[in-house]
Image (cartoon, rainbow, N blue to C red):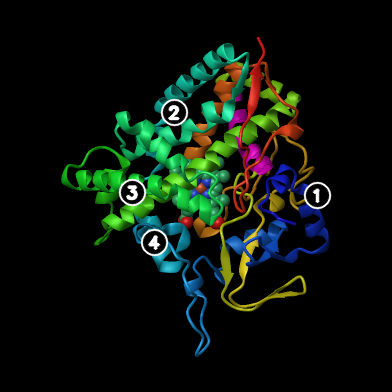
Amino acid sequence: MNIASPAFHANPHPFYRQLRDEAPVHRITLPDKRTLWLLTRYDDVATLLRDERFVKSPANVPRLPGEKPVKEPWMPAFIRPLTYNMLDQDGADHTRLRNLVHRVFTPKLIEQMRQDISQITQRLIDGALQSSRANGDTVDLLQQVALPLPVTVIAKILGVYADDYQKFARWAAAFVGNTNMTDMLLSIPSLWQLMRYLRNLIAERRANPRDDLIAALVQAQDNDDQLNDDEVLAMVVLLLTAGFETTVNLISSGVLALLQNPDQWAMLRDAVKGSAANRDGLLRSTVEELVRYTSPVSLATERYATTEITLHGVTIPRGAFVGGAIISANYDERRFAQPDVLNLMREDNRHLGFGNGVHYCLGAPLARLEVQIALAAIVEQMPNLRLAVPASQLRWRKSLIIRGLKALPVVNLA
Ligand code: HEM
């Protein structure tokens, strides 16, 4: 089974259900020939993500005497500083970076974005409504709304100049869907331009601080510790890459899930028109349920076993690459009642869609806010939206980690 293939992402559930029941620790060979030890039950994935016996960096796997260090994959020298990012670090290195960014990427900053997010969303929805009239009614909601929203929001938070949003979005879009060396090589020019742009912005903010996240990161201080320019750059690119495609996919797969469950769509649409308390409560639980149900990060990023570990009778060797199937954990019947049912009012919904433990998603409050605003606007202003093609014709992206559509063609019936 190629768990990175589009066909797999169209319906991964039967495969994962079988693994949860019959082989909760399952060894597979990936298309690039690496061996992956796949964990599929909720309890096991939750443990994997918070257990210190599993590390993010293969360099932190203890070596036996005489054992050679792990060879790092080749990459262009200008990209190397990006590898020193929080998501790839363990222990004190991770805590240090997370504490520094935590001081400035605060819930208050995110809440202050509410109005901007609403305005950006409105502009995108207006554009989609206009092109639905111009194009005989079929609109790609992913291209028109889901894709531009998160990148514009993060550009604004970072302090990218408004005149540069379009080129910034174009460079950032070059990372989306990169799964192999060819994609990587093709995206190098965009990445280079993006990094040059960000380096200039970092230098400008060091010289003249302003009220934006790049300036705040440059100045962030934890006791005597500060981030250097390479670290600020790595942090900014991580915020951009970790928060971009994931949010695009939550909006687009989320709208798809709602369209496939018309009773849930109608409930949300009615609540959005109703009292504020009702509306806000349902929007909050809707986003949680859609994170669980669509699981945009379907496989957690890599972990390595620091020691030999036996689980369900299977021994995972020291140094092994271990994968936590988040989407499988989120559909585990041992943890969730009727996991295949989309229930926007689901209670006790402690899904793993934003991860668990020290690497728990730093951007979850921002993602939640963006997606609440986007969904409310979509159901309110496109109340009679329908899929323009049968669901079986929708195409999914190829990716090991991320699960998302290539396009979401819809018609907006009057
Ligand atoms: C629907 C949207 C999102 C989903 C589903 C999501 C999911 C996740 C998951 C599962 C992890 C943990 C990965 C692991 O442990 O292997 C993670 C980490 C992270 N996310 Fe998100 N994310 C989303 C949006 C965002 C946004 C908007 C941002 C920032 C602007 C962001 C920034 C991060 C960062 C920085 C980390 C690494 C944290 C660390 O290493 O301590 N994410 N995210």
Residue marked by disc 1: 14
Residue 295, placed above or below residue 137: below
Q: Residue furthest top?
A: 414
| Label 4 element class | loop
Q: Which mark is residue 398?
A: none
Q: Amino acid at mark 2?
A: Ile
Residue marked by disc 4: 84
Residue 247, placed above or below residue 354: above
Query: Which comes sooner in the sequence, label 3 or label 1?
Result: 1
Residue marked by disc 3: 195
Q: Residue at x 74, y 24 (%)?
A: 262
Residue marked by disc 2: 117
> Gap between marks 2 and 1, in whole Å?
37 Å
- The span picked out in magenta is 278-294
Residue 82, placed above or below residue 25: above
Determine whether label 4 and label 1 are within 8 Å by CB: no
Q: Is residue 172 visible?
A: yes
